[in-house]
Amino acid sequence: MTTLILVRHGENEWVKEHRLAGWIEGVHLNERGHQQAAHTAERLAHLPLKAVYSSPVTRCLETADYLAQPHQLTVQHLPAIGEVRYGEWEGEQIKELAKLPLWHVVQHYPSRMEFPGGETMRGVQTRGVDALEALAAQHPQEMIAVCSHADLIKMVLAHYLGTHLDLFQRLVISPASISIVHLGDHGRVFISRLNDTGTIEMPPPPKAQDAPAKDN
């Protein structure tokens, strides 16, 4: 069973200003974001991480560097876990986007959303899940960290929770938070943490006998 520790990047000024950064270059962690990333790295320092993967977006790479340092690992760039490509919406303020008719689609029917000049939400969820499945196959019986973005993390968690994409906005993923997904053989999935910002212990991964009994 592979244990994937999903980490959202730390805070940046665009988060504070409620602006949609997307793939815009030069959006760095702010002072609080650096503190959050360092704190998350401390919480994971005692775990046997074998690899650290990151979205190639700057704020994620800066966060991932903190995660990798205690384990003397090199951060591996993985575009498939990168931010949603928001197209024409990138750089805009959320309060202005919220006035658009498409905002209602994003919030209530995201499975039908295609950002102007950007991606569909369905496509983002698919590439994110496919990326995690590939990582699980590449790291059997290992624990790895994956640094990504709020929307992508929420969408892959919705998939593994068996929740329709139209409901993924009900999940909350805070800056520098940790969510843990265990992907086992024969399709077994366990989620042991979600949006956790507290102390991370070292529980053994769920065993097959921990799974609920099959329906008769």
Image (cartoon, grey):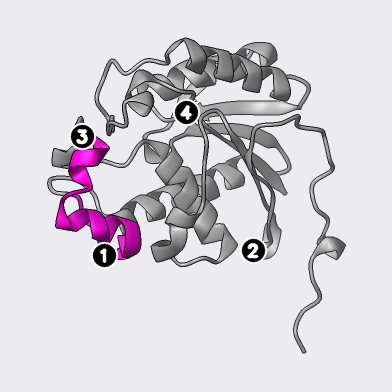
Q: Name the residue beneath numbered marker 1.
A: 112
Amino acid on which the number 3 mark rests in the picture: Glu
Q: Name the residue beneath numbered marker 4.
A: 54
Mark 3, mark 2: which one is toward the viewer? 3
Q: Nearer the viewer, residue 90 or 78?
A: 90
Q: Position of residue 9 (x, y in %)?
A: 48, 27
Amino acid on which the number 2 mark rests in the picture: Gly
* Label 1 or label 4, whichever comes before in sequence order: 4
* Label 1 or label 3, whichever comes before in sequence order: 3
Mark 2, mark 4: which one is toward the viewer? 4
Amino acid on which the number 4 mark rests in the picture: Ser
Q: Residue at x 47, y 28 (%)?
A: 54
**Element carrying mark 4:** strand
Q: Position of residue 44 (x, y in %)?
A: 70, 24
Q: Name the residue beneath numbered marker 2.
A: 187
Tell me how far mark 3 sits from mark 2, CA to CA.
36 Å
**Element carrying mark 2:** helix
Residue numbers of the magenta segment: 92-115
Q: Name the residue beneath numbered marker 3.
A: 90
Check the image and report above or below for 3 versus 44: below
Q: Is residue 35 magenta?
A: no
Check the image and report above or below for 23 versus 86: above
